[in-house]
Amino acid sequence: MKRGHRFTREQILNRIDAARRRRPVTPAWLAAKYLDERLDCVKIGLLVSRDPKTVWTWLKHDGVQMRPRGTACPALLFRKGHVSPFTGRRHSEETKSRLREIAIADGRVPFDPAVGSYMRGRRGADTPNWKGGVTPERQALYSSAEWVAAVKMVWARADARCERCGVHHNACERRGTFHIHHVVSFAVRELRAEPTNLALLCGGCHRFVHSRANVAGNFLGAAMKQMSLFAADA
């Protein structure tokens, strides 16, 4: 094709028609998924291994009445000018008690207005995430070629799946939420960039591993496992 060539209207329409004929689903199937099952273009695209924009083009070509963008998950949307559905409402005492139980079970300290934040004024070793002042060391490691190489090996070994629950990183709701977890603590210098000491975990599983719910000490080194069991007995 020569540089600067322009397609005629007839050529463009022929290409569109050819693309429509190549699609792997019928208009009736597509309309049923979109209208009856209320799937959006992204989810339909995953089913047929096509780009969401391609699915949208099929629907428009078939004359399907399209929903406004964002209506597939209205509960997750909050547009400017909208009033929060929780405005003017208050949690019941039963709900407050339940939330308190959940927080304590997760290892959190519920807020007490009479006392204020239990973290107020705490610094350094008085904080729960204190690692001995190794933040500059972390920054240096995480920007090193050694760490980059180790992370690539872990991702390849796990095939981009959480090594606890097996969910794939490219699942829409999980993309960008995976973490590299140290099985044996970062405090052990010789194992900091050792791939066998690293695990690929989704955000939810990573939080579980470091929570009191992990009574078996999964994905924790021997010393950390003992700390987890001690915390569960406390």
Image (cartoon, helix red, strand yellow):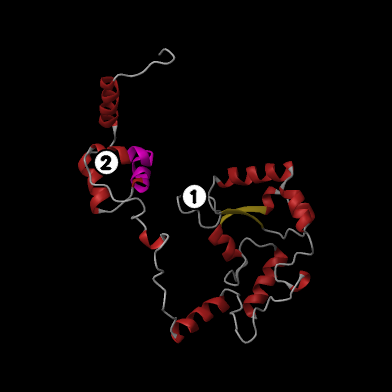
Quadrant of the image containing the N terminus: top left
**What amino acid is found at the position of numbered circle 2 in the picture?**
Leu
Q: Which residues are magenta?
A: 42-55
Residue 177 is situated, as x and y percent measured from the top left of the image, at: 55, 54
Q: Nearer the viewer, residue 82 or 100?
A: 82
Identity, as a three-letter code, of the amino acid under mark 1: His
**Where does the image place residue 124, in percent across and percent down from the top left?**
77, 69
CB contact under 8 Å: marks 2 and 1:
no
Closer to the observer: label 2 or label 1?
Answer: 2
Residue at the image position 69 percent from the left and 53 percent from the top: 197
Q: Main secondary structure of the magenta part?
A: helix
User: Circle 1 sits on which residue?
Assistant: 168
Give the left or right position of residue 196, taking residue 29 as reference: right
> Tag count in the figure?
2
Few, some or many residues within 10 Å of mark 1 (<14, 14–19, 20+): some
* Residue ID for mark 2: 59
Residue drawn at x 65%, y 46% is: 151
Task: Pinpoint residue 131: horizontal percent, then vertical percent.
Answer: 75, 64
Is 51 in the magenta? Answer: yes
Precedes in sequence: disc 2 or disc 1:
2
